[in-house]
Amino acid sequence: MTHYTTVRPPQAAPDWTIPQDWESYSADEHAMWDHLFERQTRLLPGRVAPAFLEGLDILRLSKPGIPDFAELNARLMDATGWQVVAVPGLVPDAAFFDHLANRRFVAGRFIRTPEQIDYLEEPDIFHDVFGHVPLLANPVFADYMEAYGRGGQRAGELGAIERLARLYWYTVEFGLLRGANGLQIYGAGIVSSFSESVFALDDPSPNRIAFDLRRVMRTLYRIDDFQQTYFVIDSFEDLLRQTVENDFAPLYRALLGAQDIGAAEIVDSDRLDHRGTQAYAHAKALSAGKHSA
């Protein structure tokens, strides 16, 4: 996870927000949202946490295409006191954490092109709004996100941003939930991706490991492909409890000098839902090696 950039665009306010300017979206941009939305909402039932589907009602707005933040925020504020604010792209960590701590979720206003439909490096409005906003309508997850923002402000003072970023990555972006009928997805990076929504649950390649806070903070992650490991929480309530009841300062100190755990690595203390074959990652590495030879 990175939300850092060094240069604030001239149109951005001191907190890095910009107007969404909903009226400026083209018909093609609205059509791209509609295509992505329809594709994911057909795929996700039975795979995604029920709270996400409940929160999708927040996105079913009166206008077609890309949601108008003004209309979206009216519903979201009523549900949990959160709002979505537009930003030009990546923002500094301090601004990102301040927004979360004050129940504001930052979202890029641009949407991917047809050439980027299945992968883009910088999160767009579909990832940010479709992927994240539905769970912000859930009171428990909304409290977790606020607590994470406050924790981020403290982590910056303690020099532990990288450790805390791993928690965000393996929960908010790529988390799995142990549901009554098996594993479910809830991380925004999965629910907004057609291919990873299938891979994360069905493919034998990745590890699926019970969530452990220290373990997560030691674990490296992939930013360029499907994850090699997913962590499974028992409930949003438990995730929130571990976030607010733990004093992270001693945890950060305890992890000083601790060796990082590889993205595909299994350690003795892991409670496994599934030991991955890593076949997907191995095949990609082999293919890359052939192309570079």
Image (cartoon, rainbow, N blue to C red):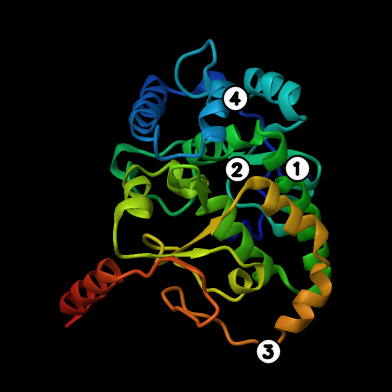
Q: Earlier in the sequence, mark 1 or mark 2?
A: 2
Q: Is residue 77 above or below residue 113?
A: above
Q: Which mark is residue 143?
A: 1
Give 21 or 66, whichever is nearer the viewer.
66
Residue 12 in view: no
Sooner in the amino-acid sequence: mark 3 or mark 2: 2
Q: Secondary structure at mark 3?
A: loop
Gap between marks 3 and 4, in whole Å? 47 Å
Q: In terms of image quadrants, where is residue 244?
A: bottom right
Which residue occupies the extreme top position in the image? 62
At numbered mark 2, what does the secondary structure look like: helix, strand or loop? Answer: loop
Say if 3 sits above or below 288 in the image: above
Q: Which residue is mark 3?
A: 257
SS under mark 1: helix
Q: Which of pointers 2 and 4 lies earlier in the amino acid sequence?
A: 4
Residue hosting label 2: 88
Amino acid at dot 4: Asp
Q: Are marks 1 and 2 in contact (CB under 8 Å)?
A: no
Mark in the foreground, 3 or 2: 3
> Would residue 246 be seen by someone viewing this image from the given angle?
yes
Viewer-closest of 132 and 116: 132
Q: For the residue carrying disc 4, how many other residues have a C-alpha within 10 Å: few (<14), some (14-19), or many (20+)? A: few
Residue 291: give x, y in percent of width and height.
17, 74
Mark 3, residues whose alpha carbon is within 10 Å: few (<14), some, or many (≥20)? Answer: few
Near mark 1 (Cα within 10 A), the count class, few <14, some 14-19 or many ≥20, is many
Q: Is residue 257 left or right of residue 249?
A: left
Dot 3 amino acid type: Gly
Please name the residue that numbered disc 4 is placed on.
21
Closer to viewer: mark 4 or mark 1: 1
Q: Nearer the viewer, mark 3 or mark 4?
A: 3
